Image (tube, helix red, strand yellow):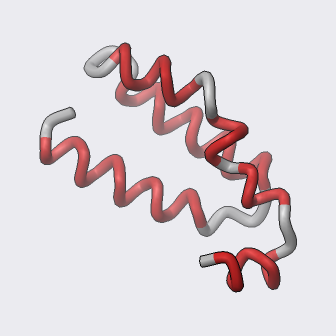
Amino acid sequence: MAKEDANLFNKELENIKLSRDHDEGKAKLENLCSQYKNKYPTFIKSLSSKIDNYLCFLRYPEEIRRRMQ
């Protein structure tokens, strides 16, 4: 991934971490992936197959998530 794209992607990931719950985070991450899938198909395919693993922390209540960071 190009440096500029990576910076934008990572910035959006930080916003996704602030999602209220798993479903909201998953929708946001899927949307982000769809924006980059034509440009970086291999990376996005790998990421898309593991979305639930990356966002499992969103299944916990906010109070617990704050302590996990």
The location of residue 19, given as percent across then percent down, is 67, 63
Q: Establish if 29 lies above or below 64.
A: above
Image quadrant holding the C terminus, namely bottom right
Image quadrant holding the N terminus, namely top left
Q: Residue furthest front?
A: 68
The location of residue 6, given as percent across then percent down, is 25, 45
45, 37: nearer the viewer: 45
Relative to 34, 17 lies left or right: right
Q: Residue at x 58, y 33 (%)?
A: 30
57, 13: nearer the viewer: 57
Relative to 46, 7 lies left or right: left
Q: Residue at x 14, y 36 (%)?
A: 2
Q: Residue at x 68, y 76 (%)?
A: 68
Give the number of callouts: 0
The location of residue 21, given as percent across then percent down, is 79, 59
Q: Residue at x 61, y 22 (%)?
A: 49
Relative to 61, 4 lies left or right: left
Q: Residue furthest left?
A: 3
Q: Quadrant of residue 48?
A: top right
Q: Establish if 60 lies above or below 22.
A: below
11, 52: nearer the viewer: 52
Q: Establish if 2 lies above or below 39.
A: below
